[in-house]
Image (tube, grey):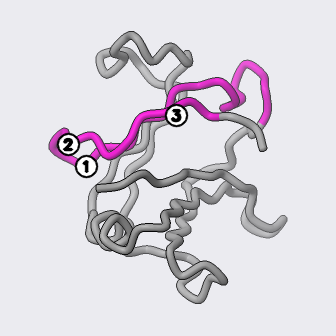
């Protein structure tokens, strides 16, 4: 699997939820992500990539099904857009996600990606 980017954006005012957008330029990576039915996304309390945090309680934790694409007719055909179960604080604060470690893994343990949330 090649690299991909993960973006967060708030949905419209009616749903009050955040969307996660997986974007890649590689067709094989797109299809590999799309085939994942049970994905766990963990947003940790800290942004230190040098330590393992799988045994500590995360700030946020979600189960995702990549088949539940909320925007199948996206302008970018290499995107998967999923609605998270709640609205994230997309800033820097006690509950904000900026600077936090994010781990995406298949159910069963295979890591699909690890990174730190930045601001763009």
Residue bearing the label numbered 1: 106
The CA distance from mark 3 to mark 2 is 19 Å
* Image quadrant containing the C terminus: top right
Quick check: 108 left or right of 48?
left
- Residue positioned 25% across, 49% down in the render: 106
**How many marks on residues?**
3
Marks 2/1 in contact by CB < 8 Å: the verdict is yes
**In the rendering, which numbered label is found on residue 60?**
3
The CA distance from mark 2 to mark 1 is 5 Å
Residue bearing the label numbered 2: 110
Quadrant location of residue 46?
top right
Q: Nearer the viewer, mark 1 or mark 3?
A: 1
Quadrant location of residue 51?
top left
Magenta extent: 91-117
- Residue positioned 59% across, 25% down in the render: 100
Give coordinates of residue 96: x percent, y percent. 71, 29
The CA distance from mark 1 to mark 3 is 16 Å
């Amino acid at each position: 699997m090649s690299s991909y980017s993960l973006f967060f954006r708030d949905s419209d005012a009616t749903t009050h939820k955040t969307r996660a957008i997986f974007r890649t330029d590689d067709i094989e990576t797109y299809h590999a992500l799309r085939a994942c039915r049970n994905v766990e996304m963990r947003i940790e309390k800290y942004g230190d990539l040098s330590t393992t945090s799988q045994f500590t309680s995360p700030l946020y934790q979600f189960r995702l099904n990549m088949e539940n694409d909320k925007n199948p007719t996206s302008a970018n055909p290499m995107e998967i857009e999923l609605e998270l179960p709640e609205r994230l604080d997309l800033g820097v604060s006690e509950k904000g996600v900026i600077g936090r470690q994010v781990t995406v893994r298949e159910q069963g343990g295979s890591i699909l990606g690890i990174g730190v949330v930045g601001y763009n």
